[in-house]
Image (spheres, grey):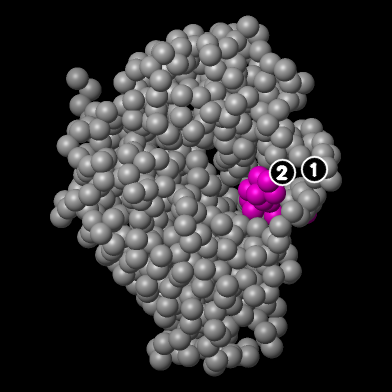
Amino acid sequence: MSDKPFVVDPSSAEVDRSVPEWAKLQIALMNDLDRAALEFVERYCRADGTLRWRDSWPGMDGSDDPYEAFMHLPLLYALGGSDSLLTHAHRVWDAITWQWTEYGQIADEFDRYYDWMHHGEGYNYFYLLPLADPHSLKLRQRAHRFASMYTAASPLGNFNPETGLLTSPLTGSNGPRHTVTREDFVTHRGVLDNYAAPFEDLPGVDYFSGKVAWSDDEVYDAILERFNARMARGDVPMNLNSTTLLLHAYMLTGEVQFADWIRHYVGRWEALAAQNDGIIPDNVGLSGRIGEYNDGKWWGGYYGWRWPHGFHVMFGAISTGAANLALVNGNLAALDFARMQLDGYHERGVEIDGRRLVPNKRADSGWTDLRLEDPRLALSLWSVSLDEADARRVERVPRMADWGSVSVPTSGRTKHYFANSLAWFEYIRGRNPDFPIKALQANRELMSMKLERMRSPKGAPDRLSNPENFTDGLDLRHDGNAIHVWQELTPIHVESLVNLTMGANIHGSYGGLQHAAVRHFDAHRKRPGLPDGVAALVSEVRSDGVVLELVNTKDLPATVVTQAGAFGEHRFDGVRLPGGRSHAIAPTKWLAIDLPARSSVRVEASMVRFAASPTYESPWHSDARAPGLIRGRSE
């Protein structure tokens, strides 16, 4: 196996000198996003990177939200954005971490305690940083320290080595939080007013009404009493999102202990599901017994089967844990755990008035909350596996809308914007040829809308610190709660660029890694991302290879180094150029593709997938050359 890029010289092949429309749109969007990102940072951050906001913020909710708004700074850089984006990406992450430490939510640079839905949302930013800067000692040091908080050796107690499980749904740098207080949810009560009740026995509350008044003090106290008795201790499936933190450390340090932790932890949840007739339970006590604090019921845990979000959010954690195990093991059989949960969900569907509905929740009375099945759940598995069986899991879902339609929101929430996953799927499956141009146009429209909102009087930085300014509905989550406002203002949306240049679905909201068929490096500048003036289009993604078109719009030649997989986990083993012959090559993770000036080159590369351990190393810096971790004083 070769560690050096195989040089692809298209001089003997057919080289197209035209510049297709998609390439022009892609380069223009990249440049516009670059400028928009810098404007966003300058408008809402001080010179030191801290956010222009209020001087205090209580409760346990909120540190994830500013991270989410700025998290695509490093990803935009890794796609080919300007050098200044990397500087801002590090500076803003450090500044948010410091600022929320001062607010009291973060300690030792990590959230003191919260659930792994919100940890996952916030630490997406942290996971994207090494794609932009794989050589950073600070990132490696932090990743090792953060992951170590969840290992058996940690004195914090987040993990119990005897049961092999986490000890609370609320964990972090302060250890497990087994008792919540009125103050913990204080900033989120108004938002939770719009959610269904988490318990069926709240006095004066109809569980099936669709809403419960967390803002009512009597109801709130009843919720907290039941939360502490039934939910605050033991493990929940949402904690499977923590496996990304351990995998992240493994890829940066190579320490096998973190990979072994993932194997054991995911395996523990597989065993719990097997104990429960194949259905994952949503609450496990400190002893390891299912339903220990819920009268033996396997439903009723935090962010579980009866929680307002139901299966959709829970499956995000299940699929993330399974995908992380697949990366660690180099074996797609690791996805079987998630497949089994998804198949069970699908099989519980029923036909009502000509529509097939599936239950999203489990209550004491049985399966409930019937909804249309969401094909994007299966798509999250297929985008990792590229297995035809997983593609059939997507396609078995009835098409209640046009999957090929490309959309952009003109109003409403844009947090976690990934509107066009199904349209990309249709394109890769050969059914949506206009997707590249439409997706780029939609991405540009969204960016323009957000810039207009950001530049308006409603988006003025001095308004953000006063909740009284949000009765006009700028914060689209909840009037008066401005913690989400940056997510509604940020113009840094890169879904189309990820789809087209990486041949990938954009990463999940709750802490999954950014998987990809390929990603690119600039050989001249020796940094991640496409060279200036070069566009890329992955038009085919198969289990055995990819088809990639590269367009150089400049008058000077360029060289793109294309990597097999987001983390070098795959290997190229063959290359074919139009009009040229096929090349069988020694397996390598990189192709160095030379692009003449003003040229377009189509490359078909065969690939062996999951052939190596995942890593963040670049073509110019191996893991073996990485500096050792700093070891502090022992006393």
Query: In which quadrant of the rendered view does residue 141 lie?
Result: top left
Disc 2 + disc 1, Cβ < 8 Å: yes
Residue 297 lies, with reference to residue 259, above or below; the image says above
Q: Can residue 590 be seen in this view?
A: no
Q: Which of 298 and 601 is in front in this view?
A: 298
Q: Is residue 546 visible?
A: yes
Q: Callout 2 environment at 10 Å: few (<14), some (14 to 19), or many (20+)?
A: some
Left or right, residue 91 beside residue 72: left
Residue at 32% x, 33% y: name it.
110
Left or right, residue 569 beside residue 279: left
Left or right, residue 531 beside residue 317: left
- Amino acid tagged 1: Arg
Residue 620 is situated, as x and y percent measured from the top left of the image, at 39, 63
Residue at 28% x, 35% y: name it.
109
SS majority, magenta: helix
Residue 593 lies, with reference to residue 87, above or below; the image says below
Residue at 69% x, 70% y: name it.
432
Mark 2 → mark 1, Cα distance in angstroms: 7 Å
Q: Nearer the viewer, residue 438 or 536?
A: 438
**SS for dot 1:** strand
